[in-house]
Every structure is written in structure tokens, then in C-alpha cells.
Image (tube, helix red, strand yellow):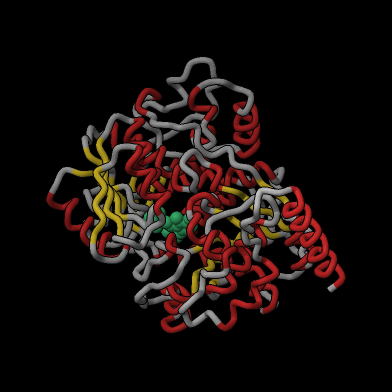
Amino acid sequence: MPSAAASEKGSESGPPQGSFCFRCIGCGSVTHLAAQDFRCAQCGNLLEITDPAWKSLDAATLKSVWRDRRASNAMLDRSGVWRFRELLPAPATEQQVVTLREGNTPLYELPQASRTTGVPRLYAKHQGLNPTGSFKDTGMTVAATFARQAGYRWVACASTGNTSASMAAYAARGGMRSLVLVPDGKISWSKLSQALDYGALTCQLRTDFDGCLRLLQELVRRAPVYQLNSINPFRLEGQKTLALELMEQLDWQVPDHVIVPGGNLGNSSAIGKALLEMREIGLMARLPKLSIIQAEGANALVRTLRETGGKRLISVQAETRATAIRIGNPASWEKAVKVLQATDGACEQVSELEIAQAKAEIGAEGIGCEPASAVTLAGLKKLLHLGFVKREESVVLILTGNLLKDPDFTMDFHRGSLFQGTAHEGGSTELKPFRHPPVVLDATLDAVTQALDQAEKSDRTHSNA
Ligand code: F0G
């Protein structure tokens, strides 16, 4: 297969690329063609993509090629995913690539959270600043490219909202039709509205995410649709680039901890795979600990590790206001267990109240994120408390989705109605200092001046407290 780099004009050729294959994460068997369901024909486990050529890449050459591409205007170089193409499966030609210039997301310091947690070297990599507002775009560019190359007219996914938004956008850019299966009433309107605008056939099914995913698995066996859930290993290859870009932003200084939310567990698996590959190539000398945080109400991996030592999946009936991770039967749980073990990471759960507070704290940094992303900061506090993270260590939180993805959650939180009528109502009074409800006033100078005075007074009270 010709390499993407070799076919590109106006960009340096970089190290040579090989051709990739699929390897089963269970029995290890290797094939060059994957079935529609992306499962091993021998044992039924998930597949991952690998390429024997990756092992022989030269770390110093890669670093310099990747850096130089940041100054290039070539289409592939402008993508924060394809810029790292030496570690991606290569499409037949550059023209196949479906890209919205994804990746290239900022790494922020979090000065206020640094103060409150006592961790001076605390950073957030904001994947919510991708084109459709979530980390899904980095995987979708690769998987949509291979869907188009394979000649599919329809792509499909089950989703809690972000995958469907991303898939619909990339399908539209790639001239494909998209079929979205989402749980009725359980995803945010802003995510749903994206899928509609990008032209997807959107089906709101009377079930949960796990029910949608089960149905999709049956559908792909029967109809010629290409599934773009994270079971599709091309997705995870694109999502690996988060870790490559992060290391480049840290000048290749390895952080002590990377903390990521866990839902269907594709993203943590992808980041872990990237870390292991980087170490093998010599791009990093040691591994950070990769920790996965789940919502208490959607804690399948936490329970799987605690109750079976990671040997058998414990599914749960998922319930959380962090709807992006409202998943009880995570598809990539075995991949996630492997990366936790390989990196010595931890897996923890956080409560609804802890998620809401952490989200408001990230908002107060001027960054903001959606609720599922905020489990990372809530999880860091827990890991500090448990002594797993030390204050002098460096920590990177992966913020997976944009603040604007779930405005209902944000509005309910600030108005004080988020936990009304729920089991968490009692504890929610402690969140009052983090709330900034809107005030409705007469349109007079007096009314606004008074509101300003009151805000000043309340700020002073809090700073003296
Ligand atoms: N954060 C956000 C904002 C998400 O949308 C998701 C997953 C996760 C974290 C968890 O990542 O599944 O790779 O462990 N959202 C999927 C979706 C399931 O359909 O949009 P994961």
C-alpha cells in the first residue's frame, strides 16, 4: 500500500511507512482484513491495528518531522491527527483523507485548580476544542477515511451524542450518508442538533446506549453499513494522536499522571496504546500512569476490577447526569484493563456532586467542559486523597468535550435545580459557592449598580472565608 507521506506534494517525505494489519487482543491472531463487526474470526475478541514498521521508526527523526510540519500548509499537515501519520494506518491515497483539521488542541495550565489541589504542575488537554466539540473527531477522521476508501455509502454508530455529532460531520465531508442510533431523551439537545444539521438519519431509540450498541452490532451483520463506534480500531488509531500531541507540547517530558474519563473505554485504550508505542519507539523513556475515572452510577470498569480483578466484565444499569458516559456495558473494557495494568494506573469513581463541583471549577478557569470531562478533576482530588497522586507530581487531565455540549446541565447547576428531587439534593447546598445564577432586574442603572455592589460584597466575604 503506498504511504500517505510518499504521495504528498510540498511536504517532506519523513520516515518510510509499512502496511498495517489487525491483531486480536485476545488470541493474538493477525489478519489483513477485518469483518464488519471488527471482531476476531477465531475467538470473537476485539481487534487492534498494528504495523511491524512502527518498531523501526527513529524517534529523533519523527520528532523533527512532526515539528517541521507545524509550519506547513499542506492538507495533511494542517490536521493535528495526520501530522503524526507515521504512526497511523496509511490510506491508499491522500485524496481519500476526510479531514476537518482536527486535533491541534491546547494544553492549558489550571492555576486555580493548582491552588485548591496543591498540585503546581497541573494541566488540561482540551479535546473539546476539536471541530465538532469533542475528542471523537481525532478518531473519526481516520475511520471515516477508511470507510470512504472501502466504498461505503452508509456509516453508522450508536452514541451518547458526541460520536454521532462527529460521525455525521465527517460523513457529510466525505460524501457519505450517516445513520445515528441514540437513546431517546438521554442525550443533550446540542449534540442531537449537530447530527441533524450535518444531515444524519437520526433514530432516537426507546432504550439506553447499551441497547443502541447491541442493535447496531446486529445491523452491521445484515446491512452494508460501516460501523464507526470505537469498536472500529481505526477510530482508536486517530485518538492515539492526543497522546503524541500532548508529549510534543510537553517538550517530550513525560508527565507522572494522565487522567481520562471512562465510558465505552475506547479513548483510554487509545491513549494507552499510544503511550506503549511511544515507549517502544523511544519517543519516551518511561510511561506516565494512565488513570480512568467513571461516574459512580456508570462504574462498570471500577466494579470489574474490584470484583473480578479485571477478568470478567460486570455490567451495570448506568445512570448519571454526565450523559456522555452513561454506559453500563463498555465495549473496550479488556483493552482498558490492559492499559491500566501496563501503566500502573488507577481506576476510580466519583459522585454526581463531585462531578458538578469539578465542572464549575473548570468553568471558573475560563475553559469550561462538559460534565463527563469534569470527572477528571474530581478523580484527581480522590487520587490525591488516596495518596496515589503526590502533590509534587505532574498531572494532565484530558477534557473530552466542550462546555457548550450540555447547556442544560450548566443552566440547571447555576440555577440550583440540577439535583432537585434526586437523592443528591441534600448534599447540593455545599455547591452554592460555585453557582452563578443569572439575576432578572428592572432595566435601571440603580438595579445594575446594586447587583454590582452585592457581587463585590459576596466576593469579599468569600475571599475572607
Ligand atoms: N467524554 C465524553 C465527552 C464522551 O462523549 C465520551 C464518550 C467519553 C468521555 C468516554 O469516552 O467512551 O472512549 O470511554 N462518548 C461516546 C459517544 C460513547 O457516543 O459520544 P470512551
Q: Residue at the location (56% across, 43% down)? A: 129
Relative height, residue 172 to residue 207 (above, below): above
Measured along the vertical axis of the image, is residue 281 above or below residue 86?
Answer: below
Q: Is residue 453 left or right of residue 206?
A: right
- Residue 329 position within the rendered picture, expressed as x and y whole percent measured from the top left: 34, 69
Q: Nearer the viewer, residue 337 or 125?
A: 125
**In the rendered image, the vertical position of residue 344 relative to residue 254, given as above or below:** below
Q: Does any portion of residue 453 appear in the rendered image?
A: yes
Which of these two is toward me, 131 or 191?
191
Q: Residue furthest left?
A: 222
- Residue at the spot 61% in from the left edge and 29% down from the top edge: 65
**Quadrant where the image shows the N terminus:** top left
Q: Nearer the viewer, residue 172 or 28?
A: 172
Q: Please tell me which residue is depicted at 54% across the width and 36% down the height of the picture.
A: 80
Give left or right: position of 407 versus 438: left
Residue 44, quarter of picture: bottom left
| Quadrant where the image shows the C terminus | bottom right
Residue 265 appears anywhere in the view:
no
Residue with the most extreme right position: 464
* Picture quadrant of residue 363: bottom right
Residue at the (49%, 48%) spot, across then down: 135
Residue 444 % position (x, y): 71, 49
Residue 422: give x, y in percent of width and height: 46, 79
Asked which quadrant contains residue 42, the reply is: bottom left
Tell which quarter ligand 1 is in: bottom left
| Residue with the most extreme top position | 10
| Residue 56 percent location from the top left of the image | 52, 40
Is 357 on the left or on the right of 329, as rendered? right
Q: How many marks?
A: 0
